[in-house]
Image (cartoon, helix red, strand yellow):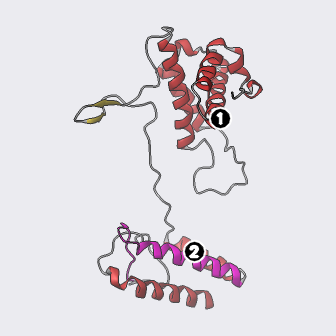
Amino acid sequence: MLEIRWEFYPLVAQQELARTWLTVQRNLQLAPATIDAYGRNLNDYLAFCTRHSLLPETMTREHLSLYVQDLASRPNPRGAKVVSISSGYGLSRSTMQQRLTTVRLYHDYLIEKQIRPDNPVGRGNYVAGKGVSTTRRGLLPAQHKLPWIPSDLEWQDVLRALKEERLRNQVMLLLAYDGALTHCETPGSRFRLPCGRGQSGIPTRAWPFAHRGCRRGANRKCRSKYMLNIIRTLGD
């Protein structure tokens, strides 16, 4: 049987309820990685409660909103050297969702033990014939981050910087760009390749989206035109 390494979750080990809950998850034969994630997430939650003199048994939704704010304002765990298009601080949305899932499951356990009457995290309710009810939501609704699309000026900056690179790096970027355009030709894809009208070699912000002027049969020709224009831009 998997032995829980309590030294990684000291606050969980110190509190009887938290220790019992994590032991139950181990006894239910959950994967070791899941047990480790639960332990680390619960230890983080208990650390927040300790810093703010709060108890999980009496936590309210207002208190949990402070926990979410704390997660969203923490320094980037990957370090300041990581170049990111996002703000560079706070945990990712998926990580915060994972932390709150562990908190919700732990509060479910407290409800089962009749220690508290409700779960402050909350969850969406399934209604037969209507799907998930929107009258009651989870604490942190899921969001899907839209892809970043460079503007014309940003793309020109990329091409200017690429001119100073070695031929190998230029070829690698062009291959990656060509692969992205090839993805547009995939049957069933909602993306279509533009016909290249307007600016030579410089894609506009609309290039990944539908363009009626370029049918699927002409995608290969359009892609070749785009690649040729970019190569000419690098040669200027």
Mark 1 = which residue? 32
Mark 2 = which residue? 176
Q: Secondary structure at mark 2?
A: helix
Q: Is residue 181 magenta?
A: yes
Between marks 1 and 2 in the image, the one whose residue lies nearer the viewer: 1
Quadrant of the image containing the C terminus: bottom right
Mark number, residue 9: none
Mark 2 belongs to which amino acid? Ala
Q: Tell me the residue at 36%/85% (across/down).
A: 218
Q: Are marks 1 and 2 in contact (CB under 8 Å)?
A: no
Q: Nearer the viewer, residue 122 or 160?
A: 122
Is the magenta region chiefly helix, strand or loop? helix
Q: Measured from the top left, where is residue 165 in percent x and y?
A: 71, 80
Q: Nearer the viewer, residue 112 or 137?
A: 112
Q: Name the side, left or right, on which 13 lies relative to 180.
A: right
Q: Tell me the residue at 40%/77% (across/down).
A: 193
Magenta stretch, residue numbers: 167-195
Kindly give the residue lying farthest to the right in the view shown: 7
Q: Is residue 229 above or below residue 175?
A: below
Q: Measured from the top left, where is residue 191 in percent x and y?
A: 38, 69
Q: Is residue 28 above or below residue 145?
A: above
Q: Measured from the top left, where is residue 185 in percent x and y?
A: 40, 75
Q: Quadrant of residue 72?
A: top right
Q: Is residue 138 magenta?
A: no
Quadrant of the image containing the N terminus: top right
Kindly give the residue lying farthest to the front in the view shown: 1
Mark 1 belongs to which amino acid? Pro
Q: Tell me the residue at 58%/57% (across/down).
A: 85
